[in-house]
Image (cartoon, rainbow, N blue to C red):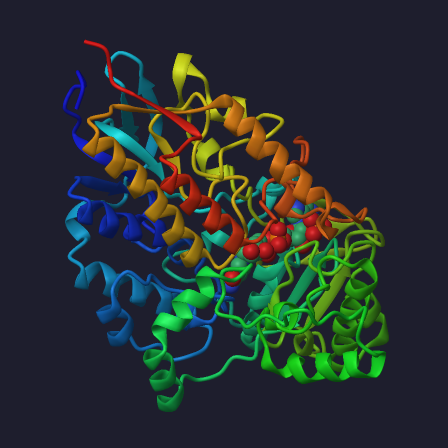
Amino acid sequence: MGAQQQPDYDVIAIGAGFAGLGLIHYIREAGLSIQVFDKASDIGGTWTWNRYPGAASDSECYYYCLTFSKELLQEWKWTVRYPGWEENLSYMHFVADRCDMWPHIQLNTEIVSADFQEDSGLWQIKTAAGEAFTCKYLVSAMGMISEPVIPDIKGMDNFKGPLFHSARWPEEGLDYAGKRVGIIGSGATTVQMLPVVAETAANVTVFQRTANFVMPAVQQPMTEEWEEDIKAHYDEIIAKCRNHVFGMAFDSPVGRTIEETPPEEVQAILEEHWPRGSFRFVFETFDDLLSNPESNKVAGDFVVSKMKEKVKDPEIQEMLTPKGYPFFAKRPPLDHGYFEAYNRDNVKLVDIGEREPIVEITETGIRTTENEYEFDIIVLATGFQAYTGAQEALPIRGRNGLLLRDKWDTESSSIMGVFVADFPNLFMITGPQAPFANLPTSIEENIKYIVDCLNKMESEDLDLCEPIQQAEEEWTAHVAEIHEQTLMAQGDKVHSWMMGANLENRNPRVLIYFGGANVYYDKLRESADAGFPEVEFAQMAG
Ligand code: NAP
């Protein structure tokens, strides 16, 4: 090390989900010290916060996991295709236990500030309890969909019963049996929550602003034969994820397009793939679903026709029909009985988009322009400030005291979602302008890249890694150019978190690299192989 002071830890990471656990493994392997802090009472990230009924992964279990240990992959046993939050948490405990990670994890510890110290070249973090720690490398492992969006609805404090965001479902549980439940929002969270809550609640009312394209999940038990097959092919599965545009172990319909396939054959292929469930419908059917507007419409119409087969009431069918934006311009939720739930007598759908917007929350429920609804419990399933929310929730100060949230005021720029100019030695895992993909795949690729950078710095006695402003501008321009070519840039109703368009008082921006996760992982590798040309390395003077 140049003239740098000795920090408390080489690496401090904030967040003990997949990213925090993965970091502990790879950083220890590099021979560096690491401490991971999390404000939650348990590890698990998303899975410790999102304890709402029905919460489950939308990635299939066998590639929704960390892959650094072949033994662990062979040892762990999943019970279903899409594990619920409890099973995901058990898996993460299994990883932490088996890899002796607990000494590196400090829970119940909220980080309230992170400051780059110009004089020492170290980062200092402070906790809510008043502790302070220094590190050479600070890593944001806080997750890309973790900071809840609480809508600004009049009278929210007046409601007498429990009212909370879906990602803050009470940890001790909540007895909703026989209760009247109101859910604001109809995204992936509500699609999972509704069928489970409706089973025992007195009634459930969903307040929907925008209808979604919803695809079937097709939950399945893990059978012995399936498990054996998975475990015999893990190398191939990992390679498939690494080389897939969405980071998932899918096959690609190379060269097959809706445009060039006769219409009857198109329908037959869509029908054949529909019952298989998962995002496979999008990625294993045709290559032009997300690029050709006509092909996209064919697939979108097919999805809507399937919804109509399930929902009995034509009026509800109409309300559940997405309008004004292309299929996949909002992230499509996966269905575990969502549509069937609307056939129940105790489930109601309210259109707050056009017919009866919410006016206020009262002591006893929700008042719209047309009606008053009484509830015992209100859940705000209103989504997240994706990609940037967690990093902006605490003050992170880089060079000259620059606040990250100020830097990202109008544009959330980065270099490949990992580096940010003016924030030396700060690394993000799945930061803004990284792809949206199967998260454990992206997380592990990000970690390997970051650890390669740290290894270079340690072996060459370097103190500082300064992201280059021009490289950031180039990446930001590149990401914007690709975004413009996608269907995501179309539609007048795309209030999608994928563009930060779900936030009031903030301009939408390009948050996601849509060039393909596989292409992105290649770019990370090229950068590492070329010695990280996007950053400047330096030693502290002295
Ligand atoms: P979301 O998809 O952003 O949905 C939020 C819902 O709340 C939308 O229906 C939105 O309406 C509505 N809303 C927001 N603000 C509102 C307001 N002020 N008044 C009325 N309605 C409002 O959020 P989410 O369902 O929590 O899902 C977010 C993402 O998290 C998903 O897309 C997914 O990537 C991830 N997730 C994953 C899983 C999984 O993998 N198993 C499960 C849940 C979530 P508009 O559409 O009109 O804005």
> Which residue, as the protein is rendered here, is positioned at the far front?
530
> How many marks overall?
0
Residue at 43% of width from left, 44% of height from top? Answer: 526
Q: Is residue 413 above or below residue 183?
A: above
In this view of the protein, can residue 363 be seen by the observer? yes
Visible residue check, residue 378: no
Q: In this image, 434 relative to 8: left or right?
A: right
In depth, the one of 473 and 424 nearer the eye is: 473
| Residue 489 percent coordinates (x, y) | 74, 45
Give coordinates of residue 456: x percent, y percent.
Answer: 26, 35
For image coordinates 41% across by 71% down, the residue present is 237
Up the image or down, 248 lies above or below 6; here it is below
How far from the left and from the top, in percent, is residue 260? 80, 71
Residue ID at (18%, 47%) = 28
Identify the image quadrant of residue 346: bottom right
Q: Quadrant of the C terminus?
A: top left
User: Can you say whether 207 is above or below 63 in the image?
Assistant: above
